[in-house]
Image: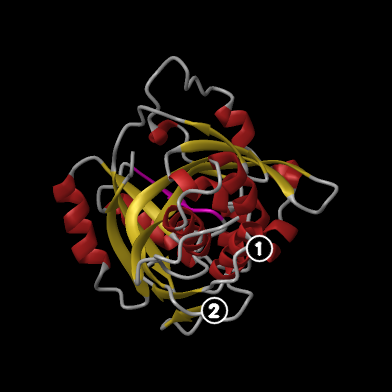
């Protein structure tokens, strides 16, 4: 392939966080992964990325100490796969302004990777169709395909089989991330599939025929595992509900907990109260529908 050398000097991108409005673990696979049934929704909490062109190779820069800048970063993996498939030796510098809490169940790293894939595809004249980008995204990580469109979706398999969900009831979302280090691998390792309960609850879903209100289905099979080790998560749930949240749930494998608020005033008041806890990282966001 031949590509124009006329590239922009820089490209600014935003990468949204996501919450899991429900997450059922439906089985364990032979490859060690777990089958999931989850509803993911992006929210208006964004990392900001700047792509700079003109050099060779791929370099990642981030001022957050917990974010790697080498080839273990999902952004680096995404850019590497793009250029390998493109057959073009040029590279990119990616500067990440990290606003989404790291390793928090909000998908920040996956979202950053998807933003880079989509951004590079635009800059180089859209050489890859959506289906190819989806396969490249899946090779980087199970959540990355969702973030290519960042539209609400039911995800099955390991999270890569996506079915768009329209007409969700919108809520104001308050995310609370405590200063805890949760290992996703350890959470799944300690999950007892015989005790999971969300799949049974979610069989009542009728997304095709009625507007979906997440409050009726808030459920996360991973929550009890994480709470067992980190009871602070239950404390946050109670705090959100006590401040008027219509519902509260841990996102992903945690430790972030989100509360859903029907009105902006109530969400703003809760933000003010919970922001006093210095050990909690609190953000107010909207569902991106």
Residue at left offset 52%, top offset 68%: 103
**Quadrant in which the C terminus appears:** top left
- If the image is split into quadrants, where does the N terminus sit? bottom right
In the picture, measured across the screen, residue 237 lies left or right of residue 127, that is left
Q: Is residue 248 magenta?
A: yes
Residue 253 within the segment the image draws in magenta: no
Q: Which mark is residue 56?
A: 2
Tell me which segment is drawn in magenta: 247-252
- Would you call the spot at circle 2 few (<14 residues within 10 Å), some (14-19), or many (20 or more)? few
Task: Give x and y (percent) for residue 105.
Answer: 51, 59
**Residue that appears at 48% across and 48% down:** 126
Which circle marks residue 84 in the picture? 1
> Is 10 situated above or below 46?
below
Whole-percent x, y for residue 222 in the image: 60, 52
Report if residue 20 is visible in the image: no
Q: In the drawing, does residue 18 fall left or right of residue 59? A: left
Mark nearer the N terminus (2 vs 1): 2
- x and y percent of residue 205 in the render? 52, 24
The span from disc 2 to disc 1 (Cα, nearest Å) is: 13 Å
Above or below for 50 versus 233: below
| Classed neighbour count for the residue bearing mark 1: other residues with Cα under 10 Å, few (<14), some (14–19), many (≥20) | few
Closer to us: 83 or 221: 83
């Amino acid at each position: 392939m031949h590509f124009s050398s006329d590239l922009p000097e820089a490209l600014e991108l935003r990468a949204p966080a996501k919450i899991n409005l429900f997450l059922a673990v439906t089985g364990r696979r032979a490859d060690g992964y777990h089958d999931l049934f989850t509803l993911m929704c992006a929210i208006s909490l964004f990392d900001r990325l700047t792509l700079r062109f003109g050099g060779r190779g791929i370099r990642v820069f981030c001022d957050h100490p917990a974010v790697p800048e080498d080839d273990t970063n999902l952004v680096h993996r995404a850019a590497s796969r793009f250029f390998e498939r493109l057959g073009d030796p040029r590279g990119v510098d990616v500067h990440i302004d990290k606003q989404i809490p790291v390793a928090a169940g909000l998908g920040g790293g996956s979202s950053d990777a998807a933003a880079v894939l989509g951004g590079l595809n635009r800059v180089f004249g859209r050489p890859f169709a959506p289906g190819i980008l989806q396969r490249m995204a899946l090779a980087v990580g199970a959540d990355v395909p969702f973030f290519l469109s960042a539209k609400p979706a039911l995800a099955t398999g390991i999270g890569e089989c996506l079915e768009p969900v329209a007409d969700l009831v919108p809520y104001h979302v308050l995310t609370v991330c405590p200063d805890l280090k949760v290992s996703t691998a350890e959470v799944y390792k300690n999950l007892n599939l015989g005790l999971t309960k969300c799949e049974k609850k979610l069989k009542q879903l009728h997304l095709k025929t009625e507007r979906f209100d997440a409050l009726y289905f808030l459920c996360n099979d991973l929550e009890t595992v994480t709470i067992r080790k980190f009871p602070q998560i239950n404390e946050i749930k109670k705090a959100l509900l006590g401040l008027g949240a219509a519902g509260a749930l841990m996102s992903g494998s945690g430790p972030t907990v989100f509360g859903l608020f029907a009105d902006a005033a109530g969400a703003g008041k809760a933000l003010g109260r919970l922001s006093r806890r210095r050990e909690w990282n609190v953000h107010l966001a909207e569902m991106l529908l």
